[in-house]
Image (spheres, coloured by chain):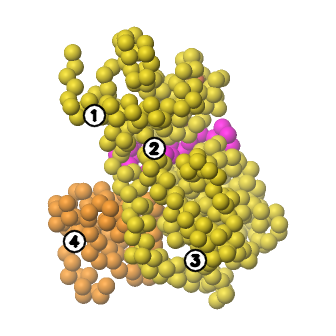
C-alpha cells in the first residue's frame, strides 16, 4: 500500500499490538472494533507476521473488512472497517 | 413457581440432549464417586490463591451434578428438590457456563490429588460443550475458532500471504546461520516431518534454525496448530480444524507430524484427534521438544549452554506435562542449552496451572480472574530467582508475561526451541 493511500484512510481509533503474539492481536482487534460505530475504522500496528493471515481470516468470519494492510520492515500496519 | 420461556425450553432440551450424548462412563464415574471429602481443595490454584468454597473442585463439579441429576437420574427427575436441582433456566445455564469457562482451567491437577481420581476437568469439559451448544460459549473463543475455519475455507486466498511470509522468514534464518543454503521448505512431498507452527515467527524461525543445523528432512505446514474449538468443547469444529493438518500430512506423505510448543494443539492432535475420528492417525504425532531432545542425544546439535548464562526455570504446561506426559524431555534439553537451570516447586505432575489455560488468556474480561488465580505461580517463579521462565505453550507464555508485569517479577518468558536456537547461533 502506498504511503499516500495509507494517509488518506482516516482511522477513528489506533492501537499498538507490537510485540504481542497470537492470538492476542486478534483478541485486541476484535475488542477495539466492537467499540467503534458501524462504518468506523481501526488502525493497528503489529510485529507478529501471523496477523497477515489471522486478521483477514478473523474479519472474513466476523463480517468485517480489512481495507488495507502494509508491511514496513518488521512493522505491519492495517486498517479494519466495522461493517456490522 | 419460576416461569420458563419457550427459548429457555429449547435450550433446556438441547442441554439435556448434549448431556445424554457426552456423559460417558468416564464422566459418569467422575459425577458419581465424589464423597465430598475436600482433599482436592488445596490442589486447585484458584482455591490456593483465594480460599473460598466456590473455588474448590468439588463445588464446581457439584453445580454440574445437579443439572445432570435433573436430566438423567430417575430420582432426580421425579424429585428435583431432593438434590437441590433447579429447572435449567437461562440464568442457570449462563452461571454454569461461567463456572466451566472462567473458573476452571481444565488443568487436571485435582484429579491427581483425589483419592478416587475424580476427573473434575472432564465434568467441566462436558459443561463447556453443553454451554457452547446452547449459545453460551465465550464470544472471543468462538471468533478465534471460526477464523481458523475461515483460513481453511479460503486456503487459496491465504496461500500467497503465507508463502510471502515464509520467504521473509527464510531470509532471517539465512542471515542468522550465515548461509544462503538454509531453507524453510513448504509443500515438500515425501519429507520425513511435517512441522506445524503457531501463527507467529517465534514458532518458525528458531525451529527452522534447528532443523537446518540437524539437516532434517522437513516441511512447514500451511496451517497453525491452535485449535480453540477444543476450549469450547465444540468437537465438530475441533475436527474441522484438525482435519486441515491431517489432510496436508496425508497429501505430503510424511512419516511424522511435529507440533510446535503449544499445549492444547499438541494434546488435541496427539491424544484427542484419534478419538474424535475413531481411528489412529496414519502418521506419528510428536512435539518439537521430543525432536530436539533426540537431536541433542544423538549429538547433531552443537549447543553451547554458556550462551544462555542467566538463571532459567521451567513452567510445565498442564497440557504438555500432566496430560501429555512430556516431563523429562524439556528438562533434558534445558540442562543441555542453559548454564543455570533451576526447578520450580512443585513441578512435573504436581506443577500448578499458570491460571491462563484452556482459553482464559483470550477473554479480556477475565484478566482479573487470571491474575488472581496466577498468584501462586508468580510466587513460585519469584522463589526460583530465575530471570527467564521457559514454557512450552503460548497461552502459558502470555499469562506468565502478564503475571510478570502484574506482580513485578521482572522475568522474560521464552520457549525451549528459542533457547536451543540461541545456544546454536
Ligand atoms: S478429593 Fe475427590 S472425592 Fe474428595 S471432594 Fe475432591 S473430587 Fe470429591
Ligand atoms: S481441573 Fe484444575 S482448575 Fe479445574 S478444578 Fe481441578 S485443579 Fe481447579
Q: Is residue B20 magenta?
A: no
**Distance CA(mark 1)–CA(mark 2):** 20 Å
As drawn, the chain in yellow is B
* Residue picked out by circle 1: B10
Task: Give the residues in magenta.
Answer: B346-370
Counting residues from the start of the chain, the first of labels 1 and 2 encountered is 1
Tell if the residue under mark 4 belongs to the same chain as the one under mark 1.
no
Numbered circle sitting on residue B187: 3
Residue depicted at 54% across the width and 26% down the height: B28
Q: Which residue is more in the foreground, B141 or B157?
A: B157
Numbered circle sitting on residue A11: 4
Q: Is residue B99 above or below residue B211?
A: above
Secondary structure of the residue carrying numbered label 2: loop
Numbered circle sitting on residue A4: none
Residues at badges 4 and 2 in contact (C-beta under 8 Å)? no
Tell if the residue under mark 3 belongs to the same chain as the one under mark 2.
yes
Amino acid at each position: 500500500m502506498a504511503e499516500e493511500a495509507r494517509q488518506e484512510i482516516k482511522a477513528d481509533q489506533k492501537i499498538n499490538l507490537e510485540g504481542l503474539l497470537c492470538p492476542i492481536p486478534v483478541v485486541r482487534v476484535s475488542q477495539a472494533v466492537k467499540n467503534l460505530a458501524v462504518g468506523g475504522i481501526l488502525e493497528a500496528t503489529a510485529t507478529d507476521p501471523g496477523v497477515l493471515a489471522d486478521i483477514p481470516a478473523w474479519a472474513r468470519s466476523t463480517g468485517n473488512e480489512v481495507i488495507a494492510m502494509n508491511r514496513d520492515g518488521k512493522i505491519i500496519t492495517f486498517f479494519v472497517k466495522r461493517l456490522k | 413457581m419460576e416461569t420458563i420461556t419457550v427459548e429457555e425450553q429449547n435450550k433446556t432440551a438441547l442441554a439435556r440432549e448434549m448431556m445424554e450424548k457426552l456423559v460417558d462412563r468416564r464422566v459418569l464415574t467422575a459425577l458419581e464417586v465424589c464423597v465430598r471429602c475436600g482433599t482436592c481443595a488445596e490442589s486447585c490454584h484458584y482455591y490456593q490463591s483465594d480460599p473460598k468454597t466456590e473455588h474448590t473442585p468439588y463445588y464446581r463439579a457439584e453445580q454440574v451434578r445437579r443439572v445432570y441429576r435433573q436430566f438423567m437420574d430417575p430420582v432426580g427427575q421425579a424429585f428435583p428438590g431432593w438434590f437441590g436441582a433447579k429447572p435449567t433456566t437461562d440464568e442457570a445455564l449462563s452461571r454454569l457456563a461461567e463456572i466451566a469457562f472462567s473458573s476452571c482451567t481444565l488443568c487436571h491437577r485435582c484429579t491427581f490429588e483425589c483419592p478416587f481420581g475424580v476427573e473434575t476437568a472432564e465434568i467441566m469439559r462436558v459443561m463447556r460443550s453443553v454451554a457452547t451448544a446452547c449459545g453460551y460459549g465465550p464470544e472471543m473463543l468462538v471468533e478465534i475458532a471460526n477464523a481458523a475455519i475461515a483460513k481453511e475455507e479460503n486456503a487459496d486466498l491465504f496461500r500467497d500471504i503465507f508463502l510471502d511470509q515464509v520467504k521473509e522468514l527464510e531470509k532471517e534464518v539465512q542471515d542468522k546461520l550465515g548461509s544462503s543454503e538454509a531453507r524453510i521448505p513448504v509443500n515438500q512431498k515425501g519429507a520425513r516431518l511435517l512441522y506445524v507452527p503457531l501463527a507467529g515467527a517465534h514458532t518458525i524461525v528458531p525451529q527452522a534454525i534447528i532443523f537446518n543445523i540437524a539437516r532434517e528432512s522437513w516441511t512447514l505446514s500451511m496451517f497453525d496448530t491452535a485449535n480453540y474449538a477444543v476450549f469450547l468443547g465444540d468437537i465438530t469444529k475441533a475436527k474441522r480444524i484438525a482435519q486441515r493438518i491431517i489432510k496436508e500430512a496425508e497429501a505430503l506423505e510424511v512419516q511424522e507430524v511435529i507440533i510446535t510448543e503449544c499445549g492444547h494443539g499438541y494434546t488435541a492432535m496427539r491424544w484427542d484427534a484419534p478419538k474424535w475420528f475413531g481411528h489412529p492417525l496414519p502418521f506419528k504425532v510428536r512435539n518439537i521438544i521430543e525432536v530436539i531432545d533426540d537431536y541433542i542425544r544423538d549429538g547433531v546439535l552443537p549447543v553451547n549452554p554458556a550462551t544462555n548464562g542467566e538463571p532459567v526455570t521451567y513452567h510445565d504446561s498442564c497440557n504438555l506435562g500432566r496430560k501429555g506426559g512430556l516431563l523429562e524431555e524439556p528438562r533434558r534439553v534445558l540442562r543441555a542449552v542453559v548454564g543455570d537451570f533451576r526447578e520450580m516447586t512443585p513441578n512435573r505432575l504436581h506443577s500448578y496451572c499458570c491460571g491462563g489455560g484452556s482459553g482464559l488468556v483470550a477473554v479480556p474480561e477475565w484478566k482479573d480472574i487470571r491474575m488472581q488465580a496466577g498468584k501462586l505461580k508468580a510466587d513460585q517463579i519469584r522463589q526460583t530467582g530465575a530471570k527467564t521462565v521457559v514454557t512450552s505453550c503460548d497461552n502459558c507464555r502470555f499469562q506468565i508475561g502478564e503475571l510478570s508485569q502484574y506482580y513485578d517479577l521482572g522475568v522474560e518468558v521464552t520457549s525451549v526451541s528459542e533457547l536451543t536456537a540461541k545456544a546454536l547461533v
